Structure formats: structure tokens, C-alpha cells
């Protein structure tokens, strides 16, 4: 396999101006979010000295995002997706500014951090399904995996630089500068969206409500590949997400400060970046589902190594390996979900996918903090990693569909594509919706 087959394919960037603008905006949004999240975690730990409190902060963000995602997914299948992204992103800058104001108080209010983070999650959730569902309209169908890799690269660059920058800012200007940087990044994202063309849904869904959301749920339940992709990631994140322990590990296990915390928080992003720049091979897999499951198990094994390591450099290497495995899984899961979902329900399925991606790590953080309080930091990390490996083995037997091409897949040059008319779903959402989606994407 040559370098050209390994390196990330940048064709979607060359071919699509709007995709370039969306990717640029997402990068700044992710970078700012990583800076603010790292700062909020450090602030809450400093106020409470509790890893469980840090995990609860993540849960607050996810609770807000979950409610926003459910609403945003239904709106994305009914209204212009660019308008929804603009309307939800601009107020986020105001909330970040309020976090900055709270951090400047002589006695910052803990409850204010939780409330503002909850609101940040809700607004982010409203626009996120539109962002994800817009990609198939901006790139060629055979480039969805490459577009997913490029989106992940932008996010991982932000996740890599964000925590490290946050650690530097906390040690220098202070927490307020982290929240200020987040506000500026949201403003840049809004500016990038302003120049993107309108992105209306190709098939206008019914009014938001339980019936509309139930259509998306039915599609996920009846499509074994989409449902399997969600189950694989849920297993890995619920049992193996230890980021709530990072502040305590930095101080108590590695005897460092904010700079050490920044390195630990950034290490998974560094590994993910290495994975994404060498992700060209992901679009040419015969059985991508096998790789998704294997990557989830590799994530768990790397976390076991991290938990057993007493040396910071070795621990960072294991975290980087975990991030690389998670990135490969993310790219393939995203591409498969988008390929198997017609545009008629893409917003709602995207919201369910993103809800799982968001809530599972939050539950994992709470679980990690709870186990750490009952036993120790090391036991929490190692037991979670072992549970990830066991979960991957269990899912191999329970969800066979993601591990083989299946009846709904036909080959294209360099990958696989879904013939949505052969995927089980409601008649109004299957072949007719898929044909509309295919025409619009082309």
C-alpha cells in the first residue's frame, strides 16, 4: 500500500467551497469548545476537589445537548439547515462570555458553571444535527468517508490544541481568557456560516413532535447497521471514558499541575490526529464493521495500559493510541450511518447518533468518577478498559450485521455504498427517500 493510499484524501476540500467553509467553522468551534471544557473541568475540580463533580459537569452539558439534539434533529428535516446552524451558534458566544464573567468574580459560583454549561449543551445540540446532515449535500456520495475523516481532523486538531492551550492560559492569564477564546471561536463559526449557500431538507418532514421523532427511532431500530454502529460506540464510551479523572490523575498520580493536566487531556487528540492523517485506507475496506468493533476493543486495551502506567510519557503514549483507535472507529461509523440513512430522516438519525456520541461519554465519566471514589483512580481506568474489550467481544455475537457487507451494500471504486431501497424501513422513507437523497447529493 503506497503513501497515496494511506494519506487522508483531501478531494472534498478541493471540490467544495461550502464544505471548506463548514469545516473551517467547525474547527474553530471545536477548538474553542475544547479550551472552555478543559477550563470548566479544572475550575470545578478546584472548587470541589471531586472527580465526581467534574463528571457531573460533563453530564450537565450532555443533558442540555440531548434535549437540543432531539429538537434539532426534527428541525433539520423540516427547515433550512444553514439557518438553524446560524441561529444556534451565535448565542453560544454570549453564554461563553457569561462563563468568563463568573470566573472573574472574587468567589465564582459553582451553580452558575453548571447552568451555563447546560445551556451551552442545549444550543450546541440544536445546531449539530444540521451540521452533520449537511455533509452529504456538500460532497460526492463516494467521498463520505473522506469527508468524515476531514471533519474528524478539524475536530481533533481543535481537541489537540485546545486542552494544551487551556493549560497554558490557566497558568498565565487565567480561566477568564479560556472562556473569552471560546466566545471568539463561536463568532468565527457564525461568520463562516454566513457565506455558505442555503441547505434546505430535500424532503420536508412533518411538524416536530413525538411522531416525527418516532420515525427516526424506528429507522435506527430496523436498520441493523445503523443500530449496530450506535451500540458499538455506546459500549466503548460508557465503560471506558476516564476524562473526568484527568485532573485528579494529573495532581495525585503524576504529581503535576495544570500543564500536566493539559498534556493528558490533549494526548487522545494527538493520537486521533495521527490516525486521521493516515486514514486514506478507510474508504477501501471490504468489511468496515469489523474494523469498527476492533477499534473499540483497541481503545479499551490502550486504556488498560494507561491505567497501569506509572510513567507520564508511557501513559501519554497509551492515551494517544486510544485516541487513534477511537478516531478510526468514528470515521467509519459516521460514514456508514450517513450512507445508510436517506435524507428524509437524516436530521433525526443524526440527532440520535450525536445524542449517543454525547451522552455515552458523559455517563462513562460519571461511572469513572463513581468507581474512583469507591476504589481508586487506577482501578477505575483499568476496569473500564477491560469492560470495553469485553463489550466488543459481546457485540461481535449480538450484532452480526455490521461485520459483513449485508444485502444493502454494493461496491464502488474504493469502498462500499448502501442501496437504501433494500434497507428495511417504512415505505415512505426507503427507496423513494433514498433516490431523492442520491440525486440531491450528486
Image (spheres, grey):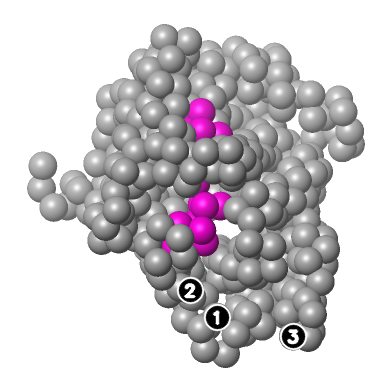
Measure the C-alpha gap from mark 3 to mark 1: 13 Å
Is residue 284 visible in this depiction of the protein? yes
Residue at 10 percent of width and 48 percent of height: 2
Which residue, as the protein is rendered here, is positioned at the far left?
2
- The mark that comes first in sequence, 1 or 2, is 1
Q: Residues within 10 Å of mark 1 (few under 14, many from 20)?
A: many
**385, above or below 157, in the image:** above
The magenta-colored residue range is 235-250
* Circles 1 and 2: CB atoms closer than 8 Å: yes
Residue 202 picture quarter: top right
Q: Where is residue 293? Give x, y as percent.
A: 38, 26
Q: Main secondary structure of the magenta part?
A: helix
Q: Where is residue 155? Give x, y as percent.
A: 48, 59
Q: Where is residue 188? Give x, y as percent.
A: 62, 77
Residue at 65 percent of width and 49 percent of height: 52
Q: Would you name the residue on which mark 3 appears?
A: 104
Quadrant placement of the N terminus? top left
Q: Would you name the residue on which mark 1 appears?
A: 170
Q: Is residue 243 magenta?
A: yes
SS class of the residue under badge 3? loop
Q: Residues within 10 Å of mark 3 (few under 14, many from 20)?
A: some
Residue 258 is labelled as 2
**297, above or below 91, in the image:** above
* Circles 3 and 2: CB atoms closer than 8 Å: no
Whether residue 73 sits left or right of residue 337 in the image: it is right
Amino acid at each position: 500500500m503506497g503513501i497515496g493510499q494511506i494519506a487522508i484524501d483531501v478531494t472534498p476540500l478541493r471540490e467544495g467551497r461550502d464544505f471548506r467553509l463548514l469545516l473551517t467553522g467547525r474547527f474553530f468551534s471545536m477548538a474553542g469548545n475544547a479550551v472552555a471544557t478543559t477550563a470548566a473541568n479544572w475550575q470545578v475540580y478546584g472548587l470541589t476537589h471531586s472527580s465526581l463533580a467534574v463528571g457531573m459537569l460533563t453530564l450537565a452539558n450532555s443533558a442540555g445537548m440531548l434535549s437540543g439534539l432531539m429538537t434539532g434533529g426534527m428541525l433539520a428535516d423540516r427547515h433550512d439547515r444553514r439557518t438553524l446552524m446560524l441561529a444556534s451558534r451565535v448565542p453560544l458566544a454570549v453564554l461563553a462570555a457569561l462563563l468568563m464573567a463568573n470566573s472573574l468574580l472574587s468567589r465564582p459560583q459553582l451553580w452558575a458553571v453548571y447552568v451555563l454549561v447546560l445551556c451551552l449543551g442545549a444550543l450546541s445540540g440544536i445546531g449539530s444535527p444540521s451540521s452533520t446532515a449537511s455533509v452529504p449535500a456538500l460532497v460526492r456520495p463516494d467521498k463520505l468517508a473522506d469527508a468524515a475523516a476531514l471533519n474528524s481532523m478539524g475536530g481533533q486538531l481543535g481537541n489537540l490544541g485546545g486542552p494544551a492551550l487551556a493549560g497554558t492560559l490557566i497558568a498565565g492569564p487565567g480561566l477568564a481568557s479560556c472562556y473569552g477564546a471560546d466566545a471568539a471561536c463561536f463568532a468565527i463559526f457564525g461568520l463562516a456560516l454566513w457565506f455558505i449557500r442555503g441547505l434546505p431538507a430535500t424532503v420536508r418532514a412533518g411538524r416536530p413532535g413525538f411522531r416525527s421523532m418516532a420515525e427516526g427511532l424506528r429507522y435506527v431500530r430496523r436498520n441493523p447497521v445503523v443500530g449496530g454502529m450506535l451500540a458499538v460506540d455506546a459500549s466503548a464510551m460508557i465503560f471506558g471514558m476516564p476524562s473526568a479523572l484527568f485532573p485528579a490523575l494529573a495532581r495525585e498520580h503524576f504529581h503535576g499541575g495544570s500543564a500536566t493536566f493539559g498534556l493528558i487531556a490533549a494526548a487522545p487528540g494527538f493520537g486521533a490526529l495521527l490516525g486521521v492523517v493516515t486514514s486514506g485506507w478507510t474508504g477501501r475496506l471490504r468489511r468496515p464493521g469489523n474494523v469498527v468493533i476492533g477499534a473499540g476493543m483497541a481503545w479499551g486495551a490502550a486504556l488498560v495500559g494507561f491505567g497501569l502506567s506509572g510513567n507520564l510519557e508511557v501513559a501519554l503514549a497509551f492515551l494517544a493510541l486510544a485516541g487513534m483507535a477511537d478516531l478510526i472507529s468514528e470515521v467509519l461509523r459516521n460514514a456508514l450511518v450517513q450512507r445508510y440513512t436517506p435524507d428524509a430522516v437524516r436530521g433525526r438519525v443524526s440527532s440520535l447518533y450525536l445524542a449517543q456520541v454525547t451522552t455515552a461519554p458523559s455517563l462513562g465519566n460519571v461511572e469513572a468518577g463513581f468507581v474512583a471514589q469507591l476504589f481508586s483512580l487506577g482501578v477505575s481506568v483499568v476496569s473500564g478498559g477491560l469492560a470495553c474489550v469485553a463489550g466488543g467481544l459481546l457485540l461481535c455475537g449480538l450484532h452480526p450485521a455490521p461485520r459483513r457487507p449485508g444485502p444493502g451494500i454494493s461496491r464502488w471504486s474504493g469502498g462500499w455504498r448502501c442501496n437504501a431501497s433494500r434497507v428495511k424501513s417504512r415505505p415512505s422513507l426507503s427507496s423513494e427517500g433514498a433516490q431523492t437523497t442520491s440525486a440531491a447529493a450528486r
